[in-house]
Amino acid sequence: MAIKKTPRKKPKVPLKPGAAIFFTSSWIMLIVGIILTSIGSLYFLTTGQLLSPQSLIKPSNWGGIVATGGETNASKFSDEQMETLADTGDARAVLVANFLKRYNSPLTPYDYFGKKLVEIADQQKMDFRLLPAIAMQESNLCKVIPPGTYNCLGLGIHAQGTWGFNSYEENFAMAAKILKDNYIDHGLVTPEQIMTKYTPSSNGSWAFSVNRWMKEIRYDDPVLGRIGEEDANLLEFVEQ
């Protein structure tokens, strides 16, 4: 009589601790990747702009509050909301003050100069972002200027001498008047148009930088400041 043999089952080999950790971490990374991809796709569908991998994991891009200091993250505001905010002096002053603070400008206290630059811009009926943007381009927000001149905007700096002022406030007030009387009132109402007269030897880099800084101030976000190359309309936030 033949004896039927029962096949022996192979014993289960438990995963080594290292392998278990590897598979677990792989699943976690896959899930995180799917979530970040979904966030990026949603952002693109709603704004038409692509988010870089770095900006996807930046906490300030997930909500309306910046992680440091609890300051408002204006990059999450729509253009319509920004236009409304720009009509209030406090909101504009905060945007300028944040810009000065972000780059450690010697224009301190930041809240004072934020308000002062907005006040000067309103007096001359010009975009509140223009003066700090030019100051960033010309002197790294007043860090690199001829000693004792308070000249942050490159006014009258040439081989024959340098135009000096008694204070930063005097420098910005004079620069605003010159820009209004000799540029904006003559139809030069974008950084590219101003560049043709303000610094005609530039190859375009001056206007490119000023536009970038103006956009960064608008959205309170250096990442968004580097996206796009549109020429700012200097009358956009000015009451006619």
Image: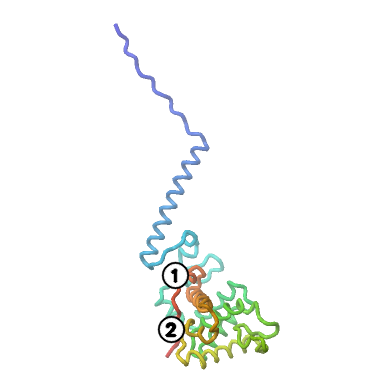
Does label 1 or label 2 sit earlier along the sequence? 1
Q: Is residue 13 above or below residue 58?
A: above
Q: Which residue is depicted at the point 46% across and 83% down?
A: 190
Residue 208 place in picture, x, y as percent? 50, 76
Residue type at tag 1: Lys
User: Is 153 or 7 nearer to us in this picture?
Assistant: 153
The mark found on residue 4 in the picture is none
Residue type at tag 2: Glu
On the image, numbered disc 1 is attached to which residue?
76
Side of 154 where 29 appears, left or right: left
User: Is mark 1 in CB contact (under 8 Å) with mark 2?
Assistant: no
Assess disc 2: are there few (<14), some (14-19) or many (≥20) residues with their C-alpha within 10 Å of its C-alpha.
Answer: few
Side of 30 where 182 appears, left or right: right
Residue 181 place in picture, x, y as percent? 51, 93
Quadrant location of the N terminus in the rendered image: top left
Q: Which residue is depicted at the point 48% across and 89% down?
A: 184
**One can see residue 94 in this view:** no
User: Is 231 or 118 nearer to us in this picture?
Assistant: 231
The mark found on residue 236 in the picture is 2
Q: Residue furthest left?
A: 1
Residue 227 place in picture, x, y as percent? 46, 69
Quadrant location of the C terminus in the rendered image: bottom left
How many angstroms separate mark 1 from mark 2 (CA)? 19 Å
Q: Is residue 236 above or below residue 61?
A: below
User: Is 57 or 193 nearer to us in this picture?
Assistant: 193
Kind of element beneath mark 1: helix
Name the mark nearer the viewer: 1 or 2: 2
**One can see residue 88 in this view:** yes
Kind of element beneath mark 2: loop
Q: Residue furthest right?
A: 147
